[in-house]
Image (spheres, helix red, strand yellow):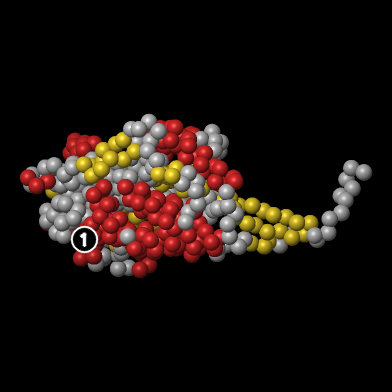
Amino acid sequence: MYINGEWVDARSGETRVIINPYNQEQIATAAEGNTEDAKLAIQAAREAFDEGSWAKKPANERGEIVYTIGKLIQRDLQEMAEIETLDSGKTLEESIEDMGDIASVFLYFGGLADKDGGEVIESPIPDSESKVVREPVGVCGQITPWNYPLLQAAWKIAPALAAGNTIVLKPSEITPFTSVKVFELMEEAGVPKGVANLVLGPGHNVGAELAESKDVDLISFTGGIATGQKIMQAASTNMKKVALELGGKNPNIVFADADFETAVDQAMNAVFFHAGQVCSAGSRLLVEESLHDDLVEELVKRTKNIKLGDGFAEDTMSGPLISADHRDKVESYVKIGQEEGAKLEVGGARPEDPELQDGFFYLPTIFTNCEHNMRIVQEEVFGPVLTIETFKTEEEAVEKANDTIYGLAGAVFTTDIDKGQRVAGKLRMGTVWINDFHPYFAQAPWGGFKQSGVGRELGKAGLEEYTEVKHVYRNTNPAPVGWFN
């Protein structure tokens, strides 16, 4: 772990074995921190913010350091991608793309750091000046998930540092190693002592301390709704700012006039990319009734050809699920779907290939005959499971798409430009794609409506999330008021 500018073991001396989900072989051991370690990291971040120079440093100088981190990631991209694939099981190609995106996040926020000089506003009071400025929030606790270990961390670290905050990061305890690596790069880039701290360990103690501590001014979390609710409650101890990204059950609407090849290809990409372990996965496919049979036939045919395997093998299309427990969860939802009356078209089992028996693999799965009130339609499975529903009208498609507690992302496929824009405008989601699925980039905000979360990451909004707004008023001709003479 990295606390107050020093690489340290957990105070308890405890460690955790980290395994490769492809074959369960041990990768390495990691420190297993607890509440005591978290408190030390928070104290270091608190002192660095209150007494250090980081928040007071000119924004362009902070930006240069954040930008340098991005350049160092580009330098070490291949090594970091290999670590990510070992840790998470995803294909090396995916990890390489992730590292490129991660570098771009640091480069973007590094360049954005000095672009907001405040705003002068017209004061209605004579002989006065008024301006609005943004200042860093303070100490930021950041908790990240296992599916995109470093990508999600980058979305938090880069804007927090660029804005002048100090941080304590807690990555998922089962995928910690690229976070360790990026802290090595932050040290190399010249991030001062105490500004960036890394505590490894489970959420029930390390994460809970970050959420509850009165010395933490903001808590940012990416993960499930149940944990997000606990964090929100814990944050009330000192009314700290809260930023939550809590997943989704994302609809992918395909109209009969869509380009068929594109719709099929993107429907596959939407749900089976990274074995469906994506918060924005298009796991709900809504198909216009007249197109349903042809689309299902083609999807089933292609799904049978998905090559599961080692993330380092060039012919692997999809890696394993992250853990045995998570595979059990996915299996339980498949069973629920069958019990609810959905029709299993393909998958629905562990692979029989002898080479895959040591890994946490699950066959890509498709259900048809799905109704909007089924649990597999409403609840986030977070695995390679696609549910297919039908609709007859545009209004019905929108109604079904919005019939969820989530509101993270969705997509519309149609060759009718006006229809695409019209439907996108009616969807209650933070991101809507038209004739595409999954693109995101550092310049555009990311976040959800409804129970998909609070706040935004990326884009200008992602930087503003780590600031407080201050109004500064100056009387240019001070004189006694005389009210109480």
Instruction: Tell me if residue 212 can be seen.
Output: yes
- From the viewer's side, name the closer residue of 363 and 250: 363
- From the viewer's side, name the closer residue of 268 and 80: 80
- Report the side of 213 relative to 308 (left or right): right
Residue drawn at 21 percent across, 42 percent down:
26
Q: Amino acid at mark 1?
A: Val
Looking at the rendered image, the quarter that the N terminus falls into is top left
x, y percentage for residue 459?
Answer: 46, 59
Residue 438 placement: quadrant: bottom left
The crowd level at tag 1 (other Cα within 10 Å; few <14, some 14-19, many 20+) is some
x, y percentage for residue 211?
Answer: 47, 37
x, y percentage for residue 162?
Answer: 50, 57
Q: Is residue 409 above or below residue 198?
A: below
- From the viewer's side, name the closer residue of 380 and 426: 380
Q: Secondary structure at mark 1?
A: helix
Residue drawn at 55 percent across, 53 percent down:
54
Residue labelled with disc 1: 264
Instruction: Tell me if residue 390 can be seen.
Output: no
- From the viewer's side, name the closer residue of 309 and 299: 309
Residue at the extreme right of the image, as rendered:
485
Looking at the rendered image, the quarter that the C terminus falls into is top right
